[in-house]
Amino acid sequence: MLILAIVRLSCSVPLRFTLGTALPHAPPSRQPIRMMAARSSFRNPNNLPVKVCVVCQQQFTWRKKWERCWDEVTTCSKRCNGERKKLARQGNAGDASSLEPSDHSDEIVGSTLTAGTNAPTEERAARKAARKAAKEVRRATREGRADPTVGQKTCNMCMRSVDLLVRCKVDNTKEWKMVCGRCWNTDAVAGGVVDGSGSNPHYRYGGLWKNLKQQAGAGGAVVDQPLYEQLRSGQLDSDEKSD
């Protein structure tokens, strides 16, 4: 009996060890693998500018819709942008509530909030008024009701503002100058001849500039009539240029 018990004991030990090692083990958690895959999934094959979202701390790349405001973009999506605004509102509410216990602090908070709300309103009104004024100036220019000097250029010799200038060379510096009709008709420039009267050996004709924004009724008062007559007769090529 003792021998039989020893045999049974010797046989049962490896059997228990075999059964223990044969039990299936639970699969390891794949959460670290998923996190690593999520972190490494960011790609930027086109080498676009990259920023980090201030809410979710994830990287995001430049997009066409952010072309004009990329420097101000801080969030990657509308959801994160909403969260950012929500946190900002909560922060402002907390700052305002921290100043409530004192009456003096109430006055300070009230004046600060009033100044903060009035400043953007005044700036917006100023920008709107400036846009309206610029629009009115453009409309008046199109309709011929603007200032008669709109679009005019000054003569490089007599410094008068006119609507018609001759581009030419008049001295040995060989620099192009814009000359009005009065100066152009003198012997010091061209003597009123397109190719030059011969009195100025340095003269060279280079075209004609005309103010395309000339207002109605401004031609007779400011612009030289002889040059306009020569332009109409075809003696000068109508090489019209405007700003």
Image: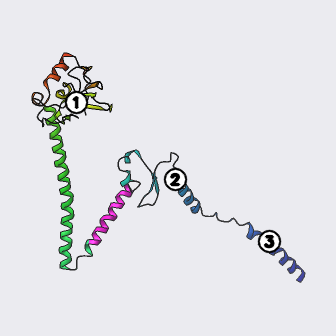
Q: SS class of the residue under badge 1? A: strand
Q: SS class of the residue under badge 2? A: loop
> Does residue 87 sit above or below 62 in this rendering?
below
Answer few, some or many: residues within 10 Å of disc 1's Cα (few below 14, many 20 plus, some between 14 and 19).
many
Classify residue 12 by image quadrant: bottom right
Q: Between marks 1 and 2, how big is the CA–CA gap?
A: 64 Å
Q: Nearer the viewer, residue 8 or 187?
A: 187
Q: Which residue is mark 2?
A: 42
> Does residue 205 sit above or below 91 in this rendering?
above
Q: Between marks 3 and 2, how big is the CA–CA gap?
A: 52 Å
Answer few, some or many: residues within 10 Å of disc 2's Cα (few below 14, many 20 plus, some between 14 and 19).
few
Name which residue lies at 85% across and 76% down: 10
Where residue 110 is drawn, which disc sits there?
none
Residue 88 falls inside the magenta stretch: yes
Q: Nearer the viewer, residue 43 or 82?
A: 43
Q: Which residue is mark 3?
A: 15
| Disc nearest the viewer among 1 and 2 | 1
Residue type beneath disc 3: Leu
Q: Earlier in the sequence, mark 1 or mark 3?
A: 3
| Disc nearest the viewer among 1 and 3 | 1
Residue type beneath disc 2: Phe
Q: Nearer the viewer, residue 207 or 4?
A: 207
Classify residue 105 by image quadrant: bottom left
> Does residue 170 sit above or below 43 in this rendering?
above
Answer few, some or many: residues within 10 Å of disc 3's Cα (few below 14, many 20 plus, some between 14 and 19).
few
Q: Between marks 1 and 3, how big is the CA–CA gap?
A: 116 Å
Percent position (x, y) of residue 106? 19, 75
Q: Which residues are magenta?
A: 78-95
Percent position (x, y) of residue 143? 13, 32
Q: From where the camera sits, is residue 106 visible? A: yes
Where residue 179 is drawn, which disc sits there?
1
Percent position (x, y) of residue 194? 24, 20
